[in-house]
Image: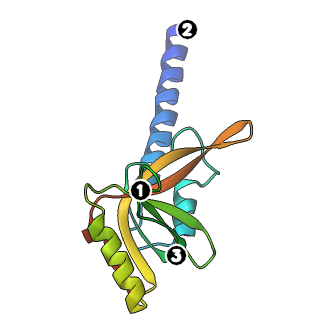
C-alpha cells in the first residue's frame, strides 16, 4: 500500500511540474514579433519586478522609442558605448553598442538627428543586469546591439 501511495505522489508531482514547465515555456515563447515600447518590454521581462532569472534573457527584442539625446555615449568616456532610448511614458532603456566597430551605428544616429528623424527602431538581444540598491539587488534589463543593420529611424 505504501508503494502505491508513493507512485501516486510521484505521478501527481510530475504532472504539476510539467504543467508549470509548459506555462513557463509558453511565456518565454510569447515575445512579440512586432516592435514594442520600452514599458511593454519591461512588463514582459519583469512582470513581478525582477528575480533571480528572467525568461526573456537571451531573446531578441524589437523596441521602438526615442533617443535620449543627453545619453549618447559614443566617445571613450567609458569602457563601453551606449545610447538610452525612452518611450512616451518616460520609461528608459540602455542599449549597449556591442559591435566590433561602433562608428557605423553612431553615424546612423547622428545622421538621423540631423534629418529630424526622432523615432528609433532597435532589434537587439535582451541581457539581464543586477542593479544594487541599498542593501538589496534587483534585476534589470538592457539591450545589446550586435549590428548597425539592426537600427533604423523614421
Furthest residue toward top: 2
Can residue 34 be seen here? The reply is no
- Label 1 to label 2, Cα distance in Å? 69 Å
Q: Quadrant of residue 59?
A: bottom left
Q: Is residue 42 left or right of residue 57?
A: right
Q: Is residue 22 above or below residue 143?
A: above
Q: What's the mark number on residue 5?
A: none
Cα separation between marks 1 and 3:
17 Å
| Earlier-in-chain disc, 1 versus 3 | 3
Q: Is residue 139 above or below residue 87?
A: above
- The residue to which callout 2 is attached is 2
Residue 37 visible in image: yes
Give the CA separation, mark 2 to mark 3. 69 Å
Tell me the element at label 1: loop
Which comes before the other along the chain, label 1 or label 2? 2
Q: What residue is rendered at 30% in x and 62% in y?
A: 102
Residue reaching furthest right?
134
For image coordinates 37% across by 84% down, the residue present is 112
Callout 2: 10 Å neighbours few (<14), some, many (20+)? few
Q: Are marks 2 and 3 in contact (CB under 8 Å)?
A: no
Q: Which residue is mark 1?
A: 76
- Label 3 element class: strand
Looking at the image, which is closer to me, 119 or 52?
A: 119
Give residue 100's position: percent from left, percent from top.
Answer: 25, 54
Q: Nearer the viewer, mark 1 or mark 3?
A: 1
Q: Earlier in the sequence, mark 2 or mark 3?
A: 2
Residue 95 is situated, as x and y percent measured from the top left of the image, at 44, 61
Which quarter of the rendering shows the N terminus? top right
**Residue behind mark 3:** 69
Q: Residues within 10 Å of mark 3 (few under 14, many from 20)?
A: few
Question: Residue 93, position in %: x, y?
Answer: 53, 63
SS for tag 2? helix
Amino acid at each position: 500500500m505504501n508503494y502505491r501511495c508513493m507512485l501516486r505522489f510521484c505521478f501527481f508531482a510530475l504532472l504539476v511540474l510539467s504543467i508549470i514547465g509548459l506555462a513557463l515555456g509558453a511565456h518565454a515563447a510569447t515575445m512579440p514579433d512586432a516592435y514594442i515600447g520600452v514599458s511593454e518590454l519591461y512588463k514582459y521581462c519583469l512582470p513581478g519586478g525582477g528575480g533571480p532569472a528572467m525568461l526573456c534573457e537571451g531573446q531578441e527584442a524589437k523596441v521602438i522609442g526615442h533617443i535620449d539625446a543627453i545619453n549618447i555615449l559614443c566617445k571613450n568616456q567609458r569602457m563601453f558605448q551606449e545610447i538610452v532610448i525612452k518611450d512616451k511614458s518616460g520609461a528608459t532603456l540602455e542599449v549597449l553598442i556591442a559591435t566590433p566597430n561602433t562608428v557605423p551605428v553612431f553615424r546612423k544616429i547622428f545622421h538621423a538627428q540631423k534629418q529630424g528623424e526622432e523615432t528609433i527602431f532597435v532589434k537587439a538581444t535582451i541581457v539581464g543586469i543586477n542593479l544594487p540598491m541599498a542593501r538589496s539587488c534587483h534585476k534589470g534589463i538592457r539591450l545589446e546591439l550586435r549590428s548597425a543593420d539592426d537600427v533604423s529611424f523614421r
